[in-house]
Image (cartoon, grey):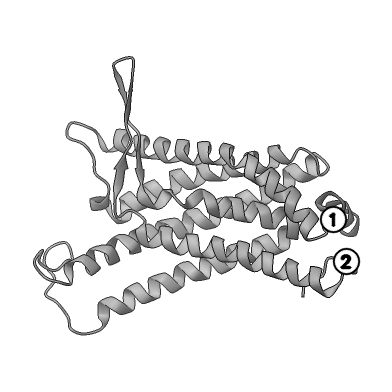
Amino acid sequence: MFDFGDKVDKVTNKRREIVFIILAGFFLGTLAILNILGISRQIDLSFTIFDRTIPFIVFIGVLPYPITFLCTDFISELYGKKRATMVVWVGLLLNIWVLFFMWLGGVLPPHPELLEGGLPALDDPNHTFFQIRKWTFGATIASMIAYLTAQFIDVHVFHALRKFTKGKMLWLRNNGSTLTSQMVDSIAVITITYLWASDAIMIKMGETVVHGLIILILSNYVFKMVAALLDTIPFYIGTKWLSKYLKLDPTKEFKEREKLSE
């Protein structure tokens, strides 16, 4: 049971538990999906403006990523910093869990002959798994470092802005925390992935590595930034509806927690 410092009926308390489990479930499920898909494919969404081609390339794993930040923002707003931080730590354990099974799948028999690059021959049925395994290891290790850094920045910036605005200006803490943390995440995950699994990152002919990495970092960040700005509306609507449904007053809860921390 959650302790919100108020007395509510069993139905409301059950609702609070169920909503938290749903939010945490979406967060953790999305995290698992993006780590497995990760860098398995680069999607080229480049476009042309005034006869000038603007490169826009993102990894497939980045597509569901904004959902994780929306979930932690909901949890931070409704359940507080402590519970949001707990979910972030569980997410880290999930990353380790994914790595464990990828490692286990590779060491169990039969053992295919590995060629240069650590992969079986192209016509070997095991080739696909070992390729995904290699990329998942690279993407997950990169995302673990970037994830911890970005998610904790997201939670801390969210609550710092909440304290600064005295619980007001929901849009500011939602966007401010997400945009800050996702810039850190984009830089970290692209650079670490390149250092760990450079073959997963395609650099075009005649393009330097630095230029290629910058395009990937900016493309992934712009995608996350647009997604973060667009999720402001569902975040406002969701917070208002959930506050009523769960009989919670986030502003009041925030002020009470502030008094207790003084």
Residue placed at 89% from the left, 66% from the top? 6
Foreground residue, 119 or 7? 7
The amino acid type of the residue labelled 2 equals Gly
Task: Say which quadrant the N terminus sits in.
Answer: bottom right
Foreground residue, 151 or 236? 236
The amino acid type of the residue labelled 1 equals Glu
Q: Which mark is residue 253?
A: 1
Residue 209's place in the image compared with 140, above or below, is: above
The residue lying furthest to the bottom in this view is 109
* Residue 70 horizontal side relative to residue 136, left or right: right
Quarter of the rendering containing residue 40: bottom left
Residue 240's place in the image compared with 168, above or below, is: below
Q: Horizontal and vertical percent for residue 12? A: 80, 68
* Residue 211 horizontal side relative to residue 85, left or right: left
Residue placed at 74% from the left, 68% from the top? 15
Q: Which residue is mark 2?
A: 5
Q: Which mark is residue 51?
A: none
Q: Horizontal and vertical percent for residue 27? A: 55, 60
Q: Secondary structure at mark 2?
A: loop
Whichever of callouts 2 and 1 sits on the residue coming sooner in the sequence is: 2
Q: Are marks 2 and 1 in contact (CB under 8 Å)?
A: yes
